[in-house]
Amino acid sequence: MADLTWFTPGTHITVRGLRKSFGGNPVYVGFDIDLPKGRIVSVFGPNGCGKSTFINMVAGLLPFDGGEILFEGKTIRETRIGYVFQNYREALFPWQRALDNIHYPLKLMGVPRAERNRRIEELVAGFDLKFDLHRYPYELSGGQQQTVSIMRSLVIEPEVLFLDEPFSALDYEMTLIMRDQLQKVLIARGTTAVLVSHDLEEAIYLADKLLLLTRRPSRIAEFLDIPLPRPRSPATLTDTEFVRIKAHALEVFQTAVRGS
Amino acid sequence: MELRPAKARLAQGHAERLGILGTGLHVDAAWRRWMLMSVGPLALFAIWYVAHEQAWVTQRLLPSPVRTLQSIWTNMTQGGMGEDFLRTLWRTLQSFGIAAVFGVPLGIVVGANAKIYRSIEFLVDFFRSTPATAMFPLFMILFGLGDFAKIAIAAFAAWLVILFNVAYGVMNARQTRILAARVMGASRLRIFRDVLFYECLPQTFVGLRTAVSLALVVIVVAEMFIGGDDGLGKRIIDSQITFDMPQLYGTILVSGVLGYGLNLVFLTLETRLVHWAGRS
Ligand SMILES: Nc1ncnc2c1ncn2[C@@H]1O[C@H](COP(=O)(O)OP(=O)(O)OP(=O)(O)O)[C@@H](O)[C@H]1O
Ligand SMILES: [Mg+2]
């Protein structure tokens, strides 16, 4: 196997020979991919093809059977990451106010109070919040709770941010707002992000690169560039280039679903 | 679970005290609530009164509510009922305390370890279903007829309830929250302290509340049948033997006040301390 401590410039996450099966059913059988640094990669594929499994293995939440995953040559333990769960209700701590939820990861890192406050203020400035962070999570709407979740994952200035269907529990209007919020913050910070989405439009809208997966055992159906200019806006959705990419991705997806 | 409505009422009271419902409305709503709440008890007393006056039941078996309240008053002021009340309360709290001290930590350990839980699940369920009163003779042989036997048996019953509920609370902790803490770099100890502890708190309170009610039941019965010369249970049995019906009814009412009061205290604590229960 190649020496992964050496990595192609511009690559952040290097995955080689990744293998994983559940009870004898293989999900990944030797999976290789390079994810670029400071870019947003969307992962899209059929139901149950292993999208969550993939980002959970990369994020170090799920052990894998074989292969290697490195972050610019470092292991996951040496890398600062953030993770945004689909189920924000069960991811935030309801016994703490929203603000204390955001403080928590910094406290774990041993950051002193004054510095924590400074960082949170800076973070808040990048979001246009229309609610009070002194409320408890259960007093906030779904979109507001997920905003707090995203803030909590960004406050430590992660090198990589993982998001597993972060907006799928929100209504359409909220989803549109949240997409733009996320795009703005990620672009401003230049954070590497891996986003799983079951909504092709959303996957393309947010991504610099779109990873299309086949049915399990999962392979790369296609890993395509999304060269649409930033910042993207709702007008992007009707842009001819966007429409072309979407049609192409859909075709690849349908072929992948039908089986290879 | 049967106490949910009471809890909802408490939460509503809380909202009103905070003025969430607005000032004008707030006084009005509070008044109406009190009025509605007193309808039931007043109706009961009225029916009781009429039943006594009309002698629907032999008056010897059903003293008038006025006589009953008078008996409570005289027993409280001169008859030593206050002491009995305090004795019963103190025994209940002692057994509850013992149960909680041993039940909560053990419940956490058992709940955090699926193997331990599975291996003792049946035992806990079995003894939880065994009537505590069935074990009176055994405890009398083991611990004699003193106070300790009473407290031990009530503590045992309450302990099982607490153990079970805490373990259940830990086991049903949301996996996502634990994962979230792990991804943020929390150590096992921090996850325990910062996540699991809070996750099991709502269920722990359910256990504590159930346990204190159960401890009271067992203590009162123990006072009736295990020797001793004070406590509300003892007074109830004495009233039966001397056929002092007003005192019998009165003591039953006072026991009810004690049980209700304990429950209210725990409910209040619960809504204050576990504000997120059922809302997340
Ligand atoms: N803990 C597990 N035990 C057994 N099988 C599992 C487990 N987790 C996932 N799987 C299986 O592995 C496959 C991939 O699951 P995964 O959750 O990664 O899919 P996904 O692409 O995220 O699906 P979805 O679109 O539904 O979110 C599925 O077929 C699933 O049944
Ligand atoms: Mg998934």
Image (spheres, coloured by chain):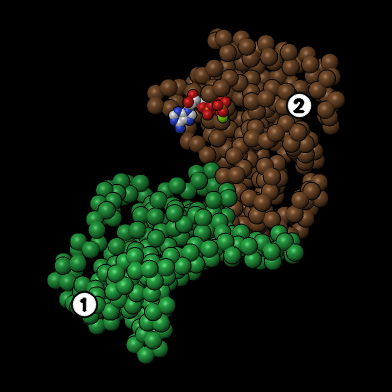
Q: Mark 2 highlights which residue? A: A205
* Quadrant placement of the C terminus of chain A: top right
Some atom of ligand 1 lies within 8 Å of the CB belonging to the residue at label 2: no
Whether residue A235 appears in this view of the structure is: yes
* Chain B colour as displayed: green
Residue A99, percent from left and from top: 69, 56
Please give the name of the residue rendered at 38% of the width and 74% of the height, measured from the top-left corner: B64
Please give the name of the residue rendered at 78% of the width and 48% of the height, measured from the top-left corner: A129
Q: In this view, does A230 lie above or below B218?
A: above
Instruction: Name the element at disc 2.
Output: helix
Q: Which chain carries label 2?
A: A
Q: Tell which chain the image draws in brown.
A: A
Camera-side residue of B29 and A228: B29
Q: What residue type is labelled 1?
A: Ile
Q: What residue type is labelled 2?
A: Tyr
Camera-side residue of B253 and B154: B253
Whether residue B180 appears in this view of the structure is: no
Label 1 Cα crowd, 10 Å radius (few <14 / some 14-19 / many 20+): few
